Image (cartoon, rainbow, N blue to C red):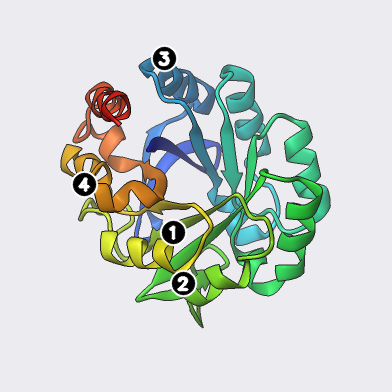
Amino acid sequence: MILFPAIDLKDGHCVRLEQGDMQRATVFGTDPGAQARAFAKEGFEYLHVVDLNGAFAGRAVNGDAVAAILAAVNIPVQLGGGIRDLAAIEGWLARGVTRIILGSAAVSHPELVREAARKFPGKVAVGIDAKGGKVAVHGWADVTETSATELGKRFEDAGVAALIYTDIDRDGILKGLNMEATLALAKAVSIPVIASGGLASLDDVKRMLEPDAAILEGAISGRALYDGRLDGKEALALIRAARKAA
């Protein structure tokens, strides 16, 4: 179980949205590099970074902020948001990103996912962002008729490193992870699944450590860490204890 702290970037700042709405953004910090260092110092092992402006623009917008994060820490970073072609993937991997997340591109250009996964083994993840069970793209602005499970199954043989499942309806509003939908996806595919959207407290971390959730790679936490509802050190201690007991 990996707990990924989220750094969502909007206009160069660290923010959290509510249900993916760019108009409902709360700024939690103006120095992404400092935020990354703080998470690393706290003991987190892997950062989850999203270029929110990039997700809407279809290209990197917060590149300087991402570069600051990469320069600030030595722990792995996974990056999503506006990455829509092989050149962008190759560029970010060359700059030190550990894993690239393809979301909208996985729907509109599935061949890009396959090509990237072949060229960069273990370096490509697919972001499955769902609203009412249906996949949403372009910064969650457009909801498709494709189900999360259907999209996940399309990449079973592609060599994808992970699926990141986000329940948009819960994202940023601290209602708890949608474990039912996340586990249903994980059981339907052989690709590791990461839970995202709504993680609210230590109870969610404890739920992730229950036996039926062992098939998940981990979970992403955002607002709960920033506003203090989730104590990072306490959560990490719980995870370490569970690892030792396993």
Residues tagged 4 and 3 counted as in contact (Cβ below 8 A): no
What whole-number distance in Å separates the C-alpha atoms at marks 4 and 1? 16 Å
Image height of 187 relative to 159, above or below: below
Kindly identify the amino acid type of the residue bearing the numbered disc 1. Tyr
Circle 3 — which element? helix
What whole-number distance in Å separates the C-alpha atoms at marks 2 and 1? 8 Å
Circle 4 — which element? helix
The image quadrant where one finds the N terminus is: top left
What whole-number distance in Å separates the C-alpha atoms at marks 4 and 3? 25 Å
Mark 2 Cα-neighbour bin, 10 Å: few <14, some 14–19, many ≥20 = many
The residue located at (53%, 62%) in the rendering is: 139
**Between tags 4 and 1, which lies in front?**
4
Kindly identify the amino acid type of the residue bearing the numbered disc 4. Arg
Check disc 4 and report the residue beneath it. 207
Mark 1 Cα-neighbour bin, 10 Å: few <14, some 14–19, many ≥20 = many
Check disc 2 and report the residue beneath it. 148
Quick one: label 3 or label 1, which is nearer the N terminus?
3
**Between tags 3 and 1, which lies in front?**
1
Check disc 1 and report the residue beneath it. 165
Q: Position of residue 63 (x, y in %)?
A: 67, 38
Instruction: Identify the image quadrant of residue 57.
Output: bottom right
The residue located at (61%, 72%) in the rendering is: 154
Instruction: Identify the image quadrant of residue 16.
Output: top left
Quick one: label 2 or label 3, which is nearer the N terminus?
3
Circle 2 — which element? helix
Check disc 3 and report the residue beneath it. 41
What whole-number distance in Å separates the C-alpha atoms at marks 2 and 3? 35 Å
Quick one: label 4 or label 1, which is nearer the N terminus?
1
Quick one: label 2 or label 1, which is nearer the N terminus?
2
Image height of 206 relative to 246, above or below: below
**Between tags 4 and 3, which lies in front?**
4
Q: Position of residue 188 (x, y in %)?
A: 44, 69
